[in-house]
Image (spheres, rainbow, N blue to C red):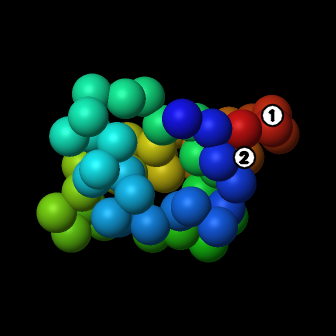
Amino acid sequence: MPGDGAFDSRQTFSYLDDQNMIPAIKTRKNAIPNAKGCYARKLAVLAQKTDYKNGLPA
């Protein structure tokens, strides 16, 4: 499911994970990769932080 930063919430990522959907949601630049109950969001934040550091768009 594609979405912009307005959809960057643990609740949204948890719902998509429960439905076996792959999120395509851009996380906020200052997002903290703590799981706090949502491992899917943690993975998305880590992947996008890596892209930000390399200068690539997420």
Q: Residue 52 has which mark?
A: 2
Q: Is residue 22 left or right of residue 52?
A: left
On the image, which quarter does residue 29 sit in? Answer: bottom right
For the N terminus, the image quarter is top right
Q: Are marks 1 and 2 in contact (CB under 8 Å)?
A: yes
Residue 16 visible from this viewpoint:
yes
Residue 34 locus on image (x, y percent): 31, 65
Instruction: Give residue 57's position: percent from left, percent from top.
Output: 81, 37
The amino acid type, in three-letter code, at marker 1 is Leu
Q: Secondary structure at mark 1?
A: loop
Give the vertical position of 7 relative to 13 (above or below). Answer: below
Q: Amino acid at mark 2?
A: Tyr
Residue 56 badge: 1
Classify residue 37 by image quadrant: bottom left
Dot 2 surroundings within 10 Å: few (below 14), some, or many (20 or more)? few
For the point 65% across and 47% down, the residue is 3
